């Protein structure tokens, strides 16, 4: 029986790590998987997290089970950053739980909507491959629309998708730093999206995996907050794995917004039951470290300063790419106005292979580059390689 299983492909993004590692060239460049890198090419642990971890080791007096909801101090401390200081729980209408990363949160959110009777999820394409993969695994149908056209968000495609929405539809929206395009909605577009989502009555599922890496912590939450004030119910999938640099510690949260605070315990009891059926309880370490950062004013300041530095470095890389303008057969200008770790350069599949074979530069077959893999030391080499393979 086990022998009847068919071979599954490896995750293409994670497979790139190995490809890059086995390339012997000293000047190779890794623009593959989405992790932040410093100007020296490292992905260090945040100093604020290091300090919180030291405190955790010194002060944590038990590792006894916490329950399927995880560290509720962590869940609550994040809320003002996500939902705003003025109304961090929308008048008692929002409650959360800790999950294993943003992926765990998406898994629970989508399993929860399936339980609630939703049948279809509207998703902009291209999207992070795991969105479709989780929907497929849960037996949720996916309705795709084009996320972008001509370097900007394709609002016509989104309007048409929402106009065709039926009862039992949800829509999955990237809150900021769209993966893989880097093309985010403008504030004015979010204003319209909030109205359209409310009118169409689809359930919004907002995926916020990169808050603070785009334009700033507040700016990156604009769209999410606009949607939440316009609709009765929503789910928010949050990841701390990028903006606290916790990646492998799998740190995230799921928040539900209910029409009435009285509905929340019943809704969340489904999240807790699904967590028990999936992983019982989330891993503690990353969330406890984030809580300790957010409970301490000095550590919070330090974390925000580290996040500012990351964002500013990525903006500087983007500005330098944009300044190169037309390079070979492609135009790098739009990259300057895009947000977060990713942008797509319209390479053909052959050009992606040539970037690897001729230049030792590794990125996804879609042409998605992780801009954080570029530094002031290798960016000219990258631009010259782009000119070479596309010229
Ligand atoms: N959502 C998007 C759009 C992502 O790119 C990622 C990336 O990893 C995640 C969610 C999940 O993040 P994680 O599970 O590593 O916290
Ligand atoms: O898109 C990325 O590169 C990140 C990291 O299965 C990632 O979101 C990639 C693939 C994967 C899990 C995380």
Image (tube, grey):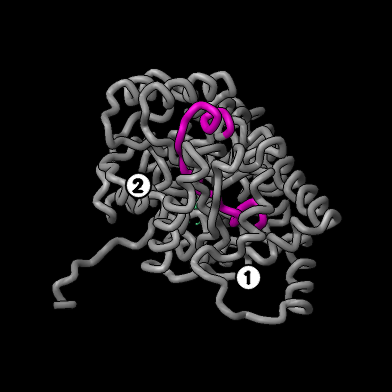
Q: Of residues 288 and 338, which is closer to you in this image?
A: 288
Q: Secondary structure at mark 2?
A: helix
Name the residue furthest front. 262
Q: Look at the numbered discs 2 and 1 and tell me whether their residues touch, using CB distance below 8 Å.
A: no
Position in image of residue 78 (x %, y %): 66, 50
Position in image of residue 337 (x %, y %): 61, 28
Task: Determine which quarter of the picture holds residue 24.
Answer: bottom right
N-terminal-most mark, 2 or 1: 2
Q: Is residue 60 magenta?
A: no
Q: Of residues 18 and 339, which is closer to you in this image?
A: 339
Whether the residue under disc 2 has CB within 8 Å of ligand 1? no
At x 40%, y 21%, the residue is: 199
Position in image of residue 299 (x %, y %): 81, 57
At x 39%, y 36%, the residue is: 203
Position in image of residue 341 (x %, y %): 58, 44
Q: Secondary structure at mark 1?
A: helix
Q: Is residue 113 left or right of residue 271?
A: left
Whether the residue under disc 1 has CB within 8 Å of ligand 1? no
Decide: is 339 above or below 375.
above
Q: CA distance from mark 2 to mark 1?
A: 28 Å
Badge 2 density bin: few <14, some 14–19, many ≥20, Cα 10 Å:
many
- Reading the image, the residue beneath label 2 is 113
Q: Is residue 231 magenta?
A: yes
Decide: is 29 above or below 315.
below
Q: Is residue 93 left or right of residue 108?
A: right
Task: Give the mark count.
Answer: 2
Badge 1 density bin: few <14, some 14–19, many ≥20, Cα 10 Å:
some
At x 31%, y 35%, the residue is: 169
Quadrant containing the N terminus in the rendered view = bottom left
Look at discs 2 and 1 and give the one toward the viewer: 2
Residue 285 tag number: 1
Point out the stretch of residues depicted in magenta: 225-245
């Amino acid at each position: 029986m086990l022998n009847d299983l068919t071979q599954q492909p490896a995750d293409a993004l994670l497979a790139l790590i190995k490809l890059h590692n086995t390339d012997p060239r000293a000047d190779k460049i890794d623009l593959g998987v989405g992790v932040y890198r410093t100007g020296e090419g490292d992905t260090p642990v945040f100093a604020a997290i290091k300090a919180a971890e030291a405190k955790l080791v010194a002060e944590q007096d038990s590792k006894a089970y916490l329950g399927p909801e995880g560290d509720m101090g962590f869940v609550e401390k994040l809320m003002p950053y996500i939902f705003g200081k003025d109304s961090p729980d929308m008048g008692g209408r929002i409650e959360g739980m800790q999950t294993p990363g943003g992926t765990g949160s998406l898994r629970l959110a989508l399993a929860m909507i399936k339980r609630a009777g939703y049948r279809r999820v509207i998703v902009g394409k291209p999207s992070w491959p795991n969105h479709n993969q989780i929907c497929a695994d849960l037996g949720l149908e996916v309705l795709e629309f084009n996320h972008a056209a001509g370097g900007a968000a394709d609002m016509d495609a989104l309007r048409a998708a929402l106009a065709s929405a039926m009862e039992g539809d949800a829509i999955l929206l990237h809150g900021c730093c769209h993966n893989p395009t880097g093309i985010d909605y403008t504030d004015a577009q979010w204003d319209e999206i909030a109205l359209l989502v409310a009118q169409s009555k689809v359930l919004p599922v907002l995926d916020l995996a990169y808050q603070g890496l785009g334009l700033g912590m507040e700016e990156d939450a604009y769209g999410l907050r606009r949607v939440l004030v316009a609709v009765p119910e929503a789910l928010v999938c949050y990841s701390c794995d990028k903006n606290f640099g916790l990646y492998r510690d799998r740190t995230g949260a799921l928040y539900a917004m209910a029409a009435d605070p009285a509905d929340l315990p019943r809704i969340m009891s489904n999240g807790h039951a699904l967590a028990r059926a999936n992983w019982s309880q989330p891993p503690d370490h990353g969330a406890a470290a984030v809580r300790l950062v957010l409970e301490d004013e000095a550590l919070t300041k330090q974390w925000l300063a580290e996040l500012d530095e990351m964002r500013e470095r990525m903006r500087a890389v983007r500005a330098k790419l944009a300044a190169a303008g037309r390079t070979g057969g492609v135009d790098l200008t739009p990259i300057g106005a895009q947000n977060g770790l990713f942008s797509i350069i319209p390479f053909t599949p052959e050009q992606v292979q040539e970037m690897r074979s001729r230049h030792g530069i590794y990125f996804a077959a879609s042409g998605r580059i992780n801009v954080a893999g570029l530094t002031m030391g290798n960016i000219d080499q990258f631009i010259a390689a782009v000119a070479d393979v596309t010229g």
